Image (cartoon, rainbow, N blue to C red):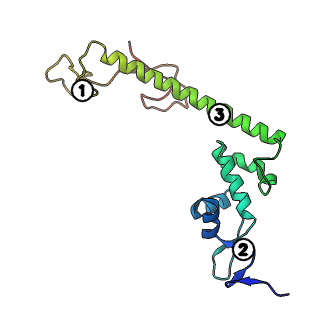
Amino acid sequence: MGVAREVGREVGRVRIGELAGSTGTTARALRHYEQAGLLSSERAPNGYRVYDERAVVRVRNIRYLLAAGLTLDDVRAFLPCLDGDVAAAPPSGTGLRVALERLAILDERIAAQTEARDRLAAALHESVVGRTVQAGWGEAQCGSAAPQRGAGQCGVMRLRRVGATSHDAPADDSPGFQRSA
């Protein structure tokens, strides 16, 4: 049984660089997808990775799902569908569940970041009130000509920890901190 060859390699096979180029990704990303169990390759006699030419569709679908906000772990739920047209297929129960779970996680992260941003903005506002700020974020007048290092004067703001839990980060700008009174 003869194998058709095209410039020294099997027809229907593409090397990692060719697959990366035709899908707009990098060889490193393809190896990462492979390590995550989303993509498979074979080794050519010279040791190079070679992929079935249908891997182009699979990689494009992986990238589509990642661009939508899913993680590689989330994409695993779509393994049976990755070789088809994921974008045009009707949503499955599993796909909807995975997407809704990811959306809830993103909403929680956004809420936590918004709270941190609001605390920082409030602390900065409180720190600047009553002080003269020159030229944007230039020098602020501190009320002391030569403040002592660590004396708490001329700092950006003062924060105090409230409602701490074991998973809170120890940094003052993490969730669970509020400006001190």
Mark positioned earlier in the residue sequence (3 or 2): 2
C-alpha distance separating marks 3 and 1:
40 Å
Image coords of residue 106 (percent x, y): 62, 34
Residue where numbered disc 1 is placed: 135
Q: Can you tell which of label 3 and label 2 is closer to the viewer?
A: 2
Residue linked to disc 2: 13
Residue 84 x %, y %: 80, 55
Q: Which residue is at 39% across, 21% downward?
A: 159
Q: What whole-number distance in Å separates the C-alpha atoms at marks 2 and 1?
A: 62 Å
Question: Where does label 3 land, which residue?
Answer: 105
Image location of residue 109, percent across then percent down: 58, 31
Q: Residue at x 65, y 66 (%)?
A: 19
Q: Residue at x 66, y 60 (%)?
A: 35
The answer to which of marks 2 and 1 sits earlier in the sequence is 2
**Quick one: label 3, few (<14), some, or many (20+) residues within 10 Å?**
few
Which one is nearer the viewer's eye here, 113 or 65?
65
